[in-house]
Image (spheres, rainbow, N blue to C red):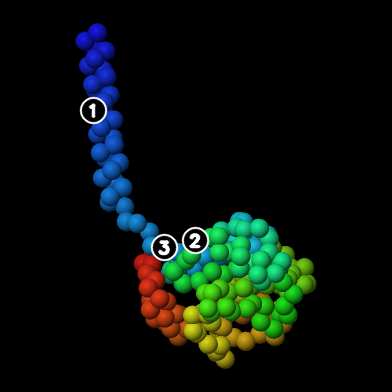
């Protein structure tokens, strides 16, 4: 009986130490900043593809980017209604949806709602393979986010903010902002209260 009691006490002491250690570890780990941008999948985009786009944007923009999936939206009101059920990011939501816009822009900015609507329909017009489609979605998300924040179209150097008129021109764009645009992005996004992530 004494041996059993000693074992129980030893286990209790071990559990207490483990809980104490876990609590200390939890205190030591910094709380990650909230998402600055949230990608909202309202167009049935492949989840693995969307995760790669999210990871790329976060690494390139140095802000937290999250993503969620909602029901497929076939209209602007439906896309917005679906997106409002998601946790609000610090800056904006980028909503992928299926509309009927032309490739001239391929996205719609809604500053009051802090929303970029990326229409996937024109991006699928020539039946691109997965890699090409991913690049198109990525560029449109980056372009829309930058323009919504207050960046402007550029003529050069290579930058994803160049104007386009067709899919070929979209595919030829750089996949990121030029150094001057990157600097402006950082300046403006911090004015929104967004924390810049440490570069690796």
Q: Which mark is residue 133?
A: none
Question: What residue would you read off at disc 3?
Answer: 34
Of marks 3 and 1, the one in the foreground = 3
Residue farthest along the right direction in this orientation: 126
Of marks 2 and 3, the one in the foreground = 2
Q: Badges 3 and 1: C-beta atoms under 8 Å apart?
A: no
Residue found at x 58% / y 64%: 83
Residue farthest along the bottom direction in this orientation: 155
Determine crowd level at label 3: few under 14, some 14-19, many 20+ residues with C-alpha closer than 10 A: some
Q: Quadrant of residue 103?
A: bottom right
Spatial distance from mark 1 to mark 2, Cα to Cα? 41 Å
Question: What residue would you read off at disc 2?
Answer: 87
Q: Quick check: 34 left or right of 170?
A: left
Mark found first going from the N terminus, 2 or 3:
3
Q: Secondary structure at mark 3?
A: loop
Q: Can you say whether 127 is above or below 156 in the image?
A: above
Q: How far from the left and from the top, in percent, is residue 22? A: 30, 41
Question: What residue would you read off at disc 1?
Answer: 13
Of marks 1 and 2, the one in the foreground = 2
Q: Can you say whether 51 is above or below 144 in the image?
A: above
Quadrant that contains the C terminus: bottom left
């Amino acid at each position: 009986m004494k041996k059993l009691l000693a074992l129980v006490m030893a286990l209790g002491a071990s559990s207490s130490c483990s809980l104490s250690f876990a609590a200390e570890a939890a205190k030591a780990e910094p709380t990650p900043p909230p998402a600055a941008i949230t990608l909202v999948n309202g167009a049935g985009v492949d989840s693995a593809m969307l995760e790669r786009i999210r990871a790329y944007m976060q690494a390139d923009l140095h802000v937290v980017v999250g993503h969620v999936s909602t029901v497929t939206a076939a209209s602007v009101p439906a896309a917005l209604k679906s997106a409002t059920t998601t946790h609000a990011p610090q800056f904006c939501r980028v909503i992928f949806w299926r509309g009927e816009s032309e490739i001239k822009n391929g996205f719609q900015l809604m500053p009051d709602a802090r929303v970029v609507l990326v229409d996937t329909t024109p991006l699928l017009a020539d039946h691109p393979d997965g890699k090409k489609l991913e690049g198109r979605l990525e560029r449109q998300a980056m372009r829309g986010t930058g323009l919504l924040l207050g960046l402007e179209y550029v003529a050069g150097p290579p930058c994803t903010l160049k104007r386009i008129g067709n899919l070929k021109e979209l595919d030829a764009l750089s996949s990121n902002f030029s150094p001057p645009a990157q600097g402006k992005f950082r300046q403006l996004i911090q004015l929104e209260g967004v924390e810049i992530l440490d570069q690796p």
